[in-house]
Image (tube, rainbow, N blue to C red):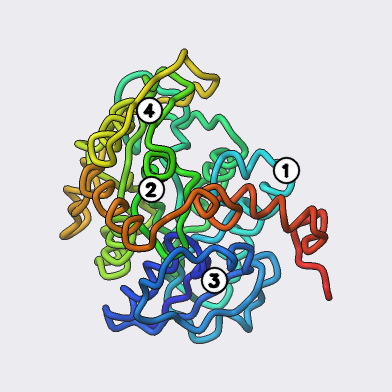
Amino acid sequence: MKVLVTGTDGYLGCLLAPELVRDGHEVLGIDTGYYKHGWLYNGLDSTPLTLAKDIRNLTVEDLKGVDAIVHMAELSNDPLGQLSPTITYEINHQGSVHLATLAKQVGIERFVYMSSCSVYGVAGGEVDESSPVNPQTAYAECKTLVERDLTRMADDNFSPTFLRNATAFGASPRMRFDIVLNNLSGLAWTTGKIAMVSDGTPWRPLVHALDIGQAIRRVLSAPRELVHNEVFNVGSSEQNYRVREIAEIVGDIFGGEVTFGDSGGDNRSYRVSFEKINNKLPGFECAWDAVSGAKQLHAVFSRISLDEETFTGRGHTRLKQLQYLISSGQLDEKLFWRNP
């Protein structure tokens, strides 16, 4: 099967593409190239042919011969989405629907969309795929809009699947240090302590980047009737952690003092059930947890002698990199690349 993956130069995409190739797929990448500066270590045995294109500019010609699409390329977290909510909607909502519309037009049946557990926002008790969504940010709101619009497009010839990923963690050559476990691990390694400004009481579900890739691969190989127009929370119920628990796990592995502050301004808190994916997606089971993920990061940081400049630099923090590209005039007000 020829699989088009958007975001192949990203944190998740660079890990997924080689796995798809090992599964026997032909992979074509699409990536606009915002984050090419961020390369933490050499950890890939192959990279696919990748077209340097913005998803908003894709045409039917770009999709010829493709059998399935895995769509990951959006402005990729809440702070980045809040940088310019209008542009976030243009890319994450309208751009994603544009890609799905092209896919349906050229007869691409399988469409795997990377959604997020952040659509649950602030939730009392445990939530599952049937629970009401309560997005708190432009990023999460766009996820709900894409799910809504692609659900309406689904028919006998177009089969979307929505993967609501828990918060990702784990090592990647295209590393991100702006997500919770990775960030706390970097802090512990470079400063010898974890000083939380919040009390750490909110709940966050976590999932390793490679387990997200596993879910994608299993959706692509699953019988159509099992995944057609379905939503799956991606993770495991055992990996619902309070943020303070994540900090304590990292502290145990990296050493150093862990301290907490008062309740912070981020009120997002949700515990998520992952029963559906573990019971209904054939073979899916998370291979990683927070402990093994933190140990993996410790081993990588030790091998590359991670320094504070690399950890805090723009290469591995999405918002900093995008702000740099804007301030240096490389991107215009719509986040399109300027011509040289």
Q: Which residue is under mark 3?
A: 103
Report whether 45 appears left or right of 317.
left
User: Cβ–Cβ below 8 Å for labels 1 and 4?
Assistant: no
Residue at 18% across / 54% down in the picture?
287
Q: Quadrant of the N terminus?
A: bottom left
Q: Which residue is under mark 4?
A: 270
Q: Name the amino acid type tagged 3.
A: Ala
Q: Secondary structure at mark 3?
A: helix
Q: Which residue is under mark 2?
A: 168
Q: Quadrant of residue 324?
A: bottom right
In this rendered view, identify the residue nearer to me: 64 or 21.
Answer: 21
Q: Position of residue 122 (x, y in %)?
A: 45, 24
What is the spatial separation of the Cα atoms under label 3 and label 4, in whole angstroms? 33 Å
What is the spatial separation of the Cα atoms under label 3 and label 2, in whole angstroms? 27 Å
Foreground tag (1 vs 3): 1
Residue at 43% across / 29% down in the picture?
132
Q: Is residue 255 above or below residue 106?
A: above
* Crowd around label 2: few <14 · some 14–19 · many ≥20 (10 Å): many
Say whether disc 3 or disc 2 marks the residue closer to the N-terminus. 3
Say whether disc 2 or disc 4 marks the residue closer to the N-terminus. 2
Q: Secondary structure at mark 1?
A: loop
Report whether 33 appears left or right of 335.
left
Report whether 76 appears left or right of 220.
right
